[in-house]
Image (spheres, rainbow, N blue to C red):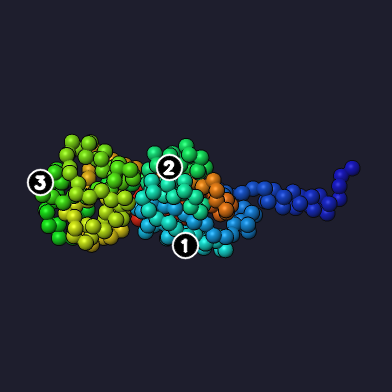
Amino acid sequence: MRAPRAIRSTGVALIAAVTSLLVVSPATAATSVFTPASDAKVTGTITVSAASSLTDVFPVIAKAFQKRYPGTNVKFNFGGSSTLVNQIKGGAPVDVLATASEPTMWSAVNAGLVGKPLLFAKNTMAIAMPADNPAHITSLADLARPGTLVGVCAVTVPCGAAARDLFALNKVTVRPVTQELDVRSLLGKVLSGDLDAAIVYVTDVKAVGKKVSSVQIPASLNVTTTYPVATVGKTTNPVVAQRFVDYLRYSLSAQGILRAYGFAKPW
């Protein structure tokens, strides 16, 4: 027996309505990672300990994150990566750790301080000089000239390890007059004119603009460092901490901001 036309029409309409709820367009799927129903629970404050080279870009990303998740607040503690790990070992109240190298992060992983890291950015090195370049530096080889005041970071922090590897790769022997514990302290001595040159990240040169002169190092002669981020095991707000880590690594917004500040993709 055939169903009445009205019943058949209603059934077709119901199936169509259910189907429309189950089908998700590619555009919607791309953003659904950051729009689950549990977002209402993403509130509260977190403290992010981050490498000094992230000083300029992370507050911009945090502003976008806080706009995406109203009710959240991101505070920062910037410093040399190894110093940040030691602070966490000492019990500092930190929720997220972002370092400027994988070896530094793995020291925290191996100590049981953080969860699984995600790579979110890559950086390379450059030579920074005072704006008037008084020592007339034009290449890495110039840093080996007697009397040239060259600064690097300490080898215990990523920018120092990168400088060491850079000199070795280019077979240049440099005797630095200072070894700073973070790259921003080092850059400050260039800005003040206390140094003729220093090995810093390309992003640091970009951040200060015309306040310094710089020499870009060819890719074949340069070294890179990758930046991992992870939640700290003793975080008091694991929901927001993990969401910030995911936002940093996976969101187009955060990755776009990183590109604008000179950081490259690590993948």
Q: Which residue carries the number 2 mark?
A: 105
Q: Which numbered dot is residue 27?
A: none
Where disc 1 sits, the SS reads helix
Q: Where is residue 7 in the image (x, y as percent from the top left)?
A: 84, 52
**If you read the primary sequence from the N terminus, does the residue marked by circle 3 or circle 2 appear first?**
2
Is label 2 in a helix, a strand or a loop? helix
Numbered disc in front, either 1 or 3: 3
**How far apart are labels 2 and 1 at the CA level?**
25 Å
Residue identified by numbered label 3? 146
Mark 1–mark 3 CB contact (< 8 Å): no
**Which comes before the other along the chain, label 2 or label 1?**
1
Q: Name the residue under label 1.
A: 63
Specify the amino acid type for callout 2. Answer: Met
The front one of 26 and 12 is 26
Q: Residue furthest right?
A: 1
Q: Is residue 27 above or below residue 60?
A: above
Q: Residue at left 52%, top 62%? A: 73
